[in-house]
Amino acid sequence: MPVKDVLVVCSGNICRSPFAEGYLRMKWAQRDQPEIQVQSAGTLGIVGSPASSDTLVLAKEVGFDLSEHRSRAVTLDVVDEAACILVMENAHRRELIRLFPETAERVHLLSEFHPSVSDPARAPDVFDPIGLPLEDYRRCYALIRDCIEAFVTRSD
């Protein structure tokens, strides 16, 4: 799948999508490929909040910095810029398609790219770790990392 600009979407844009955005940027930069623009946003409309403290810690452990991240809402302008929209949950996909029907062909559940998923129609949601212990963040972000790495590989 050729990729130009990617939008990653979750609910609040303070945990999963910022982590996925940062990790995708980091992994893409390690390739000898044309640059892509990666952004993230949330369906709940939260604007200006930093990434959660656990997200900041785990991003730093993996090798990237989210200290400047501020949440933003999904808007028509944001989705119009994206050639590919990666969502964490089927609920996010439904909401985007309801609000912006023209995005239907560009919206993909991130877990569709997980190496263990053979049928994209049966891909599971990426669970939301907000309010859970750090170990749950680690499990969530390990899943996101596996999906992003497979996405990057398939984007050749």
Image (cartoon, rainbow, N blue to C red):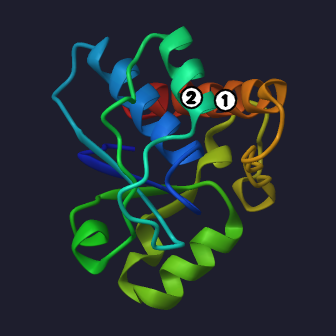
Which of these two is toward me, 47 or 126? 47
Q: Quadrant of residue 143?
A: top right
71 sits to left or right of 144: left
Q: Quadrant of the N terminus?
A: top left
Choose mark 2 or mark 1, whichever is in front: 1
> Measured from the top left, where is residue 148 in percent x and y?
53, 31
Q: Secondary structure at mark 1?
A: helix
Q: Residue at x 27, y 67 (%)?
A: 78
Q: Residue at x 69, y 68 (%)?
A: 90
Which sits in the foreground, 2 or 80? 80
**From the viewer's perspective, is 84 left or right of 5?**
right
Q: Which mark is residue 26?
A: none
Circle 2 sits on which residue? 150
Q: From mark 2 to mark 1, how far is it between C-alphas?
A: 14 Å
Q: Residue at x 73, y 31 (%)?
A: 137
Mark toward the start of the polypeptide (2 vs 1): 1
Task: Please name the amino acid that badge 2 sits on.
Answer: Ala
Total numbered circles:
2
- Residue 48: x and y, percent? 35, 57
Q: Is residue 4 left or right of residue 75?
A: left
User: Quadrant of residue 111 in the image?
Assistant: top right
Report which residue position mark 1 lands on: 141
Q: Is residue 67 above or below residue 31?
A: below
Per the image, label 2 sits on a secondary structure element best described as helix
The residue sitting at 49% across, 54% down in the picture is 13
| Labelled pair 2, 1 in contact (Cβ < 8 Å) | no
> What's the amino acid at mark 1?
Tyr
Q: Position of residue 31 (x, y in %)?
A: 29, 14
Quadrant in which the C terminus is drawn: top left
